[in-house]
Amino acid sequence: MPTGSVDVLFSPFSVKSLDLPNRIVMAPMTRSFSPGGIPGQDVAAYYQRRAEAGVGLILSEGTAINRPAAKNDPDVPDFHGDEALNGWQEVIDNVHDAGGRMGPQLWHVGSARNPRTEWRAPGPIDSPSGLSSPEKKFDEPMSDAAIADTISAFGQAAADAKRLGFDTVELHGAHGYLIDQFFWSGTNVRTDRYGGPSIRERASFGVEAIKAVRDATGPDFPVIIRLSQWKQQDFDARIAETPDEMAEWLVPMVEAGADVLHCSQRRFWEPEFPDIDGENGLNFAGWAKKLTGATTISVGSVGLSGEFVAAFAGESSRPASLDNLIRRMEREEFDLIAVGRALLSDPLWVHKIRVGAQAELKDFTREALATLY
């Protein structure tokens, strides 16, 4: 538990039209509690509880854009169609009534399958090169028409988010899902304008998706993109091996209209390039901020003893010290911190941290995944 002051976590922060009361973000976490893709009152109440407890910004679970195979679980919520959008209207109204701010995470899984279900979405699978992982053929590559329609679907979902009153929107460009599959040389072997040997070339799809979202929402609406080096297909994968490669990857997205880079690591405290600045060097979000000047969110096993991959395999985690986080926030390495499992198991986590009630924090167990508490 923190021995330093947590005040740095509770200072206000603004980016464009988004004014936040503190630096704590609820990380997107797939919950699969929206039967048929329709979020109900239980989903609205779940997010409302976190808003009431003082979360600065809530980012929703992944929500499927309007493509036939955008999701790999039937109970992941959609972000298209009147019934689903009416459900999301109730969610954002409840969050606002509780004084919170929120954005949906717009999701397309690409060729990433879900090992926990036999369900398969209708229609062709979208992926840059028909690969589910390096050298593993899954289906045919996306056509130009499919790419154009997918980019348009991201823009339409963002427009709907703004129309419903959401405060921001996030594109999921991490963890081996569709946008990330374009970034990764292991799954993108295209030779057209959406592929190529350099990360700048392979980033074209993500850049165009961001432009579509920016065009759909206007200049003042904050746009976030979530990014990672690691993939669910390969925990050791890396998009950028050097800061120069990272700049080639990230700068075009910021120039296209991304205001915030949400930089996912399995463990937020690990340095991104330790050969350059040592074992206590900048993490992914720190380097992203240094290279682009954009606002950054760091995330990865915050506030718990075990890292999240092991936790989702069944390992329990206990509350852990926030001292490393506080030090990094005090030196302004990154701007915001996203908290996942700690907030999933304990909706009052932010309140307890703020008032010094660390002894009341809850452990995370896998059973928390089975309820929408």
Image: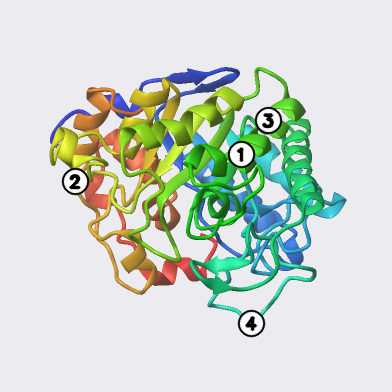
Q: Position of residue 135 (x, y in %)?
A: 51, 70
What is the distance, in whole Å, between disc 1 and disc 4 at their CAs? 32 Å
Amino acid beneath label 3: Lys
- Which numbered tag is attached to residue 204? 1
Q: Position of residue 198 (x, y in %)?
A: 48, 42
Name the element at disc 2.
Answer: loop
- Residue nearer the viewer, 280 or 139: 139
Q: Position of residue 104 (x, y in %)?
A: 63, 43
- Residue nearer the viewer, 73 or 8: 73
Amino acid beneath label 4: Glu
Q: Position of residue 134 (x, y in %)?
A: 48, 66
Q: Please tell me which residue is depicted at 49% across the width and 18% down the height of the picture.
A: 14
- Which numbered tag is attached to residue 211? 3
| Residue under numbered circle 4 | 118
Amino acid beneath label 2: Ser
What is the distance, in whole Å, between disc 2 and disc 3 at their CAs? 39 Å
The earlier-in-sequence mark between 1 and 4 is: 4
What is the distance, in whole Å, between disc 1 and disc 2 at their CAs? 40 Å
Nearer to us of marks 1 and 2 is 1
| Residue under numbered circle 2 | 321
Nearer to us of marks 4 and 3 is 3
Nearer to us of marks 4 and 2 is 4
Q: Please tell me which residue is depicted at 36% across the width and 21% down the height of the picture.
A: 11
Disc 2 residue crowd, few under 14, some 14–19, many 20+, Cα 10 Å:
some
Mark 1 and mark 2 in contact? Answer it, CB < 8 Å: no
The quarter of the picture where residue 112 lies is bottom right
